[in-house]
Image (spheres, helix red, strand yellow):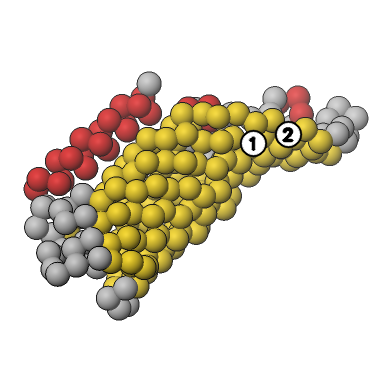
Amino acid sequence: MQNNKYFVFLVLLVLTTIKVYSQAEDITSPPEREKPYALLLFVSGGLGYFPSNQGAPDYLQPKISRINAVSTARIMWKPDHRVKVGLETGYVTFYSYKLTGESGKQGKVSLNAVPILLEFSVSVKKHFNLFAGPGVYILNTNLDYEGKTISKKVSTGWMGAAAYTWPLSKKVSIGTEAKWLYASETTRGVFGVQLQMVYKFLKW
């Protein structure tokens, strides 16, 4: 419930920002010109932190790894106004554990996900953008303990992010992005910090 309130807050923040900063300019949202429409590719990679204690039971002596890789990619459509819309996917590891059973046998378990998210974006100021949107997470729980088991499940969720980019040319910019990826089955989600490349690969 608390995480849903965070999501509502992010959406309201984006909608408010659309009005306040409707004239802001950056490489990913240039002013009106002869060809105002564009498709932008965002490719990001970095590390995520999982704050929850959810996972294996105590009797298995779990040793949690809270910091794991997070890689994402999104395509955004930039129309002739300030709001961009697009889709994001990627590969996220929420957590991984090393296990030790009563017999001393070793094992491991991890929770990974492929997000499929509908996103909206708006520029707060030059080069600084906010992103938010709902979607689903395809979850994969991998257990390697006295045999290998893979469990799949689809969970609703959302994401919120803030990114700052530096233009290298009219088509390419690089930057950093901080994001929160939340799937309802994970209780709290994961907070990630990523390096990012933005490529304007088509305009018309």
Q: Secondary structure at mark 2?
A: strand
SS at mark 1 in the image: strand
Instruction: Please report the residue visible at 44 percent of the width from the left and 32 percent of the height from the top.
Output: 157
Q: Are marks 2 and 1 in contact (CB under 8 Å)?
A: yes
Q: Answer above or below: position of 153 versus 74.
A: above
> What label does residue 1 carry, if any?
none
Q: x, y percentage for residue 56?
A: 68, 29
Q: Is residue 82 left or right of residue 89?
A: left
Q: Tell me which amino acid carries mark 2.
A: Ile
> Is residue 99 found left or right of 131 in the rendered image?
right
Residue 175: x and y in percent read 36, 65
Residue carrying label 2: 150
Q: Amino acid at mark 1?
A: Asn
Q: For mark 1, what is the residue?
A: 140
Rendering quarter of residue 11: top left
Tell me where residue 178 appears, x and y as whole percent: 38, 52
Of 114 and 63, the residue lying toward us: 114
From this view, report whether residue 5 is shown above or below residue 29.
above
Please indicate, yes or no, whether residue 14 appears anywhere in the rendered image.
yes
